Image: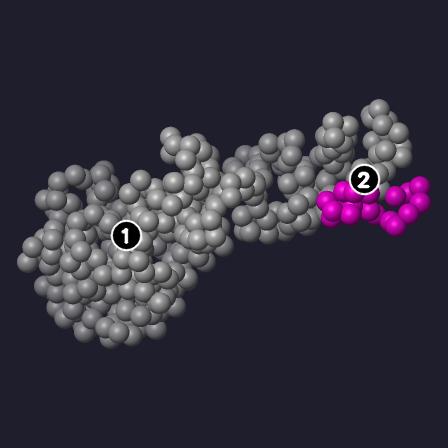
Amino acid sequence: MEHTNEQHKIIINKLVKTGIFSISDIKNVSTLSREGIGKILRKLVDNSILKKTSKKGSNVKYKLATNDESLAFLFKYNEQATIDDLARAWDVGLSSAKKYVKKFVDEDVLNKFGSPPKKIIYTYISRKDDYLFSPEQKKIIEKYYVYTTPEGRLLEGTRGFLYWAKNKSGRKDIGNLAEEYLNTRKKIYNNKTEVLMIDATEKLHHIFDNDVYITKLFHRDFDALPVFGKTALSQMIRTAKSGHTNQVLMKKIVEKLQESLDLIVSQYDIDCVAFIPPTVARKTQLMTSIARQLRISCDKIAFSKEKTLIPIQQKSLKKMEDRILNAKKTIVVSSKKQYKSILLIDDVTGSGSTLNETAKKIISQNIAQKVYALTITGSAKAGVFDIISEA
């Protein structure tokens, strides 16, 4: 086994440094016989980790295959690799290497760090699951759990749960933690599965009493769960806003929001949709991207935010009166047309101050008779929730 690991190190080094290689290239830096090296290489070929350039003969050379298992092998003794390293290992040009890498990044096999003109590096996302979850635990965790590591890796399912449990939870009883996660979800979501959205209208009345201008408020999911932190959808939003988004991630967010949007538009006869404008300028404006990708059959109108010397985000304001004042002074709503029912869409809702104040302006300016609201995530605090399920 020790000899095999040493040979693996030599092979990986050859792949990264010089690319395609022959048995002779390995023999020159190895203590094993040619026959011993050949045996190791044959096993790697049989396991689809290496590919032969020809079937047999003295000219046979080896290169890295292009699959998940081969990448796991390459990164076994390397923490990171560049596009040049991968192109050499695959024995392809940079253009082809970039296509392969994009596919692996989109499939959550590789993580990408950095952006041009700086050097971009890639790391492998380990899929090792060294804890045996119960069938129910594995099913629920794989479907709903996501954790974003400090370096920006988005780990889904049991991989994310194990990383959080081992490195962040401060507890060693993974089995009990997994069971607690299941019970927390059952309690928060009222034992319902396949949640389509959450009716959070009562939360508005709990916070604003009778001064509510939104007919119905819906969340696609909660922002966070007790003990376990940000939900999967919330983690996706956080990652997308940080600039680490990719097509697969954005597609997941849009698909989940589209389901709820379609139901609300049809059930409440919505004839116009408007998006809450962002406060802070970012490289990746999440809601702008989502607005472009959502299928919307009715009118779309744009609201704006007045620029201030220092942009203040709602979440940074602790007092309710400050949040209401912020929304009142900065949100600008206008439309030449009048509508029966407008649906406001935002990414994250805390108190609902921005949405409620925007709805107040819409109604007072006779832009619409009724205002509905849909946010990607919302706080699970304050109020009674009706979980709308597909089941």
Find the magenta span and give its range: 41-60
Q: Is residue 73 left or right of residue 203?
A: right
Is residue 188 visible to us here?
A: yes
Direction from residue 301 to residue 212 in the image, left or right: left
Tell me what residue is drawn at x 89 percent, y 35 percent: 35
Mark 2 highlights which residue? Answer: 41
Helix, strand or loop for disc 1: helix
Residue 91 location in percent, x, y?
Answer: 75, 44
283 on left or right of 359: right
Disc 1: which residue: 187
Q: CA distance from mark 2 to mark 1?
A: 53 Å
Residue at 40%, 56% (x, y): give it.
253
Q: How is the image coloured?
A: one colour
Of 247 and 309, which appears nearest the observer? 247
Question: Which quadrant does the N terminus fall into?
Answer: top right
Q: Which residue is at a point 47% across and 49% down the rendered structure image?
A: 134
Measuring from the top left, give residue 36's x and y in whole percent: 86, 33
> Residue 375 versus residue 93: which sits nearer the camera?
375
Which kind of residue does numbered mark 1 sit on? Lys
Discs 2/1, front = 1
Determine whether 128 is above or below 349 in the image.
Answer: above
Element type where label 2 sits in the image: helix
Residue 194 x/y as whole percent? 37, 62
- Above or below: residue 216 compared with residue 113: below
Residue 43 sits inside the magenta stretch = yes
Q: Relative to 74, does residue 276 appear above or below in the rendering?
A: below
